[in-house]
């Protein structure tokens, strides 16, 4: 382990004198220890030494300032490239020193680095930064405007292996340039992968490194060379991110929130507009299977239920206390719950962290109570928890049992998804709001949903997570069992301004969070519709074994939109086989367009034709999914599709739009039979794309 010892020594020496940015000579030495290729170099302290080194290295050479006071060398006039002879090295040496002192008169100069001039190639940027939530993340991009202007970079949370390094390189939009585009040659991806993997290893061993820039790294047909390396250390040791409250995170503790046998509603009111009243009513109307105890010091009964003056007055054991009283009363109520041996509380009331300091203090008091008692708390500042399988319904009346498990940061995004699922007769398995999440968090619930047999797909809306590493660990495990979809808020979160490295200035926490999700098998979607549609598709349909889709439409226009959307998402539209076309041309009227999209025109009115097209192409190995579009008022659509599902195991993604009086009826029939229907061709294609991605995810896991 001589390698580590040398790196350790370099780092310790710099830290001992409080220097947190390593000199380029030190950073290059670390590269050498790791086996990362750098141009040969030497540190000259006189002009004479510089010329001697130059002739040893061979011309042309590069001269660079080495100073702890200069981290962006070019900015200080501290870099000269392409020097061809002794004379220019001597002159350059003097000039760099003069430039540096003009830039910063008090700059301490360690010497001038003489570097072999790397031949021209493709300039790349490799870097690393340390995120408070996820730890180290690597960055890769093509140097210059692609990074500056387009932010065309890929991130990965460390550690990474060769396969994920390869994946990372291919993720950038400008990747075709690296594969060899027009006159530019193909670059050695393997060499870049090695650098990324070795950098990842370095970061794992030396967590005190907080920023790395290898900018530029020059890529060649064979090999690569890191011509500049900047390494920044952290001043004090970073604390390992910890959960807000260390609690019993067993699934049994979480289960009480979803399957309580008895609930108390504290703040239940006779006023039908008050939340306490609404929640009590929803529990009754949803047919809650346990007992309901409204608590109100004034009322004697509410909606036919006996009301209690306080939680302590209830003679029974309470599994879940639902709190809607104003924030100033919450802490006392929690203490009372602890005395009554309540294990779970949901605080719906607002007036906490979101209102500022006073609210934050309230939360601190609450955390204290939780920590000493072990009671678990959801919220505060949340909508309710819903579980239609036991008639638990709070904020909205939710009754339809279905397959979608929702985790929502604020209530309303997830609330909209559950509302759509309720109205469309799709249904949810569970709804969980995070709010301020002082205790139970997204990871606890994700883990619970992972084991919940009623949840077939998990739809999340988050802005961030409380413990990145733990979230990734759980997401990795759960995504193996069922799809996890994420709509992430707070995209525009800018990179950190106070950064020495380029990498850190580009790496917003959003980019790293997204990378972490992708690495853990979480599928990121961009809109609320996509979150809902993909959930619907993944919960009900089989995944296609490839990217080929046959579009079957009643209208050319809508079919073309579907084809455009499919192409945009990298799906393909194979032509049906000659055999299938021959058979279909014998059955169908000549006005049909026998292609892909397959346009049935007026023949679509006889919905049996959809079934015939599916049947004749069902065994085609290039067609992996069917996308029938009903874009006119067509009745009996449901019948044709339901019969078709009996002919083929391939997914049938139905789009119904412009169906006037028939659409709603047919949609209800199909969705009741477990066949999701999408309202536009674009949404149907996006749903299919989610299925394709899930198949590909499953395939890489098996492969
Ligand atoms: P800084 O980023 O601190 O300004 P660099 O070491 O990156 O300084 O040098 C500035 C530029 O000079 C680089 O972006 C690269 O284009 C070029 N350069 C530096 N070192 C070499 C080298 N050894 N071979 C070829 N080009 C080099
Ligand atoms: Mg540089």
Image (tube, grey):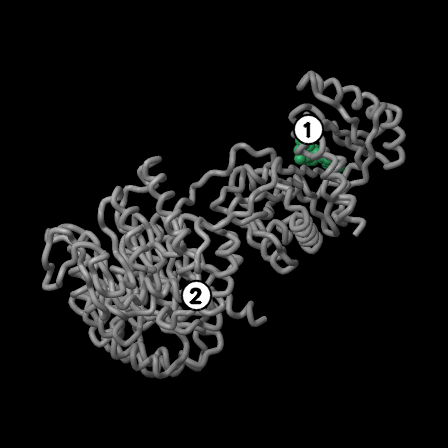
Q: Position of residue 104 (x, y in %)?
A: 67, 19
Residue position for label 2: 483
**Front in this rendered view, residue 219 or 515:** 515
Question: Which mark, residue 143?
Answer: none
Query: In what element is the residue under mark 1?
Result: loop
Q: Residue placed at 52% from the left, 33% from the top?
A: 497
Q: Is residue 337 visible to us here?
A: yes
Q: Is residue 559 visible to us here?
A: no
- State whether residue 27 is above or below residue 600: above
Residue position for label 1: 73
- State whether residue 387 is above or below residue 517: below
Q: Is the CB–ligand 1 distance for label 1 below 8 Å?
A: yes
* Image-quadrant location for residue 337: bottom left
Using a 10 Å C-alpha cutoff, classify the residue at mark 1 as few (fewer than 14 neighbours), some (14 to 19) or many (20 or more): some
Q: Position of residue 695 (x, y in %)?
A: 48, 69
Query: In what element is the residue under mark 2?
Result: loop
Dot 2 or dot 1, earlier in sequence: 1
Q: Position of residue 476 (x, y in %)?
A: 51, 62
Q: Residue placed at 38% from the left, 54% from the top?
A: 373
Q: Residue placed at 34% from the left, 54% from the top?
A: 378
């Amino acid at each position: 382990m001589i390698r580590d010892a040398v790196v350790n020594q370099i780092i310790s020496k710099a830290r001992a004198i409080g220097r947190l940015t390593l000199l380029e000579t030190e950073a290059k030495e670390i590269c050498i220890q790791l086996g990362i290729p750098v141009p040969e170099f030497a540190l000259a302290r006189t002009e004479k030494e510089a010329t001697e080194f130059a002739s040893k290295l061979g011309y042309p050479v590069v001269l660079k300032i080495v100073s702890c006071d200069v981290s962006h060398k070019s900015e200080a006039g501290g870099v000269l490239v392409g020097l061809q002879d002794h004379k220019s090295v001597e002159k350059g040496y003097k000039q760099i020193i003069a430039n540096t002192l003009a830039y910063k008169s008090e700059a301490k100069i360690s010497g001038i680095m003489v570097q072999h001039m790397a031949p021209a190639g493709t300039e790349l940027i490799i870097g690393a930064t340390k995120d408070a939530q996820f730890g180290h993340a690597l960055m890769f991009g093509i140097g210059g405007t692609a990074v500056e202007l387009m932010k065309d970079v890929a991130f990965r949370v460390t550690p990474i292996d060769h396969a994920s390094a390869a994946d990372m390189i291919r993720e950038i939009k400008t990747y075709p340039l690296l594969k060899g585009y027009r006159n530019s040659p193909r670059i050695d991806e393997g060499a870049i992968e090695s650098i990324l993997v070795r950098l990842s290893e370095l970061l794992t061993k030396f967590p005190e490194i907080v920023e790395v820039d290898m900018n530029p790294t020059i890529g060649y047909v064979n090999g690569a060379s890191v011509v500049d390396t900047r390494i920044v250390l952290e001043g004090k040791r970073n604390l390992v991110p910890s959960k807000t409250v260390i609690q019993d995170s067993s699934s049994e503790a979480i289960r009480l929130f979803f399957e309580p046998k008895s609930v108390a509603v504290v703040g239940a009111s006779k006023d039908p507009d008050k939340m306490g009243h609404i929640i009590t009513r929803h529990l009754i109307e949803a047919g809650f299977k346990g007992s309901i105890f409204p608590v109100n010091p004034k009322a004697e009964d509410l909606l036919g239920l006996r009301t209690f003056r306080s939680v302590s007055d209830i003679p029974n054991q309470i599994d879940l206390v639902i709190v809607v009283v104003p924030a100033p009363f919450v802490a006392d109520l929690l203490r009372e719950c602890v005395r009554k041996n309540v294990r779970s509380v949901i605080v719906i009331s607002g007036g906490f962290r979101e209102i500022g300091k006073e609210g934050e203090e309230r939360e601190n008091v609450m955390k204290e109570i939780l920590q000493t008692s072990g009671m678990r708390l959801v919220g505060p500042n949340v909508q309710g928890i819903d579980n239609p399988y036991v008639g638990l319904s709070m904020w909205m009346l939710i009754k339809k049992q279905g397959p979608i498990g929702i985790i929502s940061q604020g209530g309303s995004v997830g609330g909209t998804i559950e509302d759509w699922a309720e109205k469309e007769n799709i249904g949810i398995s569970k709804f969980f709001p995070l709010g301020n999440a002082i205790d139970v968090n997204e990871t606890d619930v994700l883990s619970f949903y992972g084991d919940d047999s009623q949840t077939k797909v998990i739809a999340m809306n988050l802005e961030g997570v409380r413990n990145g590493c733990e979230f990734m660990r759980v997401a990795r495990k759960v995504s193996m069992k069922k799809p996890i979809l994420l709509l992430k808020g707070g995209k525009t979160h800018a990179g950190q301004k106070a950064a020495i490295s380029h990498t850190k200035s580009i790496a917003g926490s959003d980019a790293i969070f997204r990378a972490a999700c992708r690495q853990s098998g979480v599928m990121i979607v961009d809109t609320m519709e996509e979150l809902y549609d993909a959930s619907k598709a993944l919960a009900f349909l089989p995944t296609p074994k490839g990217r080929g889709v046959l579009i079957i439409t009643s209208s050319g226009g809508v079919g073309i939109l579907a084809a455009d959307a499919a192409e945009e998402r990298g799906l393909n539209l194979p032509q049906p086989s000659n055999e299938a076309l021959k058979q279909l041309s014998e059955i169908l009227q000549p006005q049909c367009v026998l292609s892909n999209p397959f346009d049935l025109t007026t023949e679509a009115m006889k919905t049996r034709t959809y079934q015939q097209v599916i049947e004749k192409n069902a065994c085609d190995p290039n067609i992996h999914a069917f996308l029938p579009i009903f874009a006119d008022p067509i009745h009996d659509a449901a019948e044709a599709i339901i019969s078709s599902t009996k002919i083929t195991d391939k997914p049938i993604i139905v789009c119904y739009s412009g169906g006037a009086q028939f659409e709603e009826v047919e949609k209800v029939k199909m969705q009741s039979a477990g066949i999701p229907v999408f309202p536009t061709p674009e949404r149907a294609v996006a749903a299919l794309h989610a299925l394709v991605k899930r198949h590909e995810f499953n395939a890489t896991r098996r492969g």
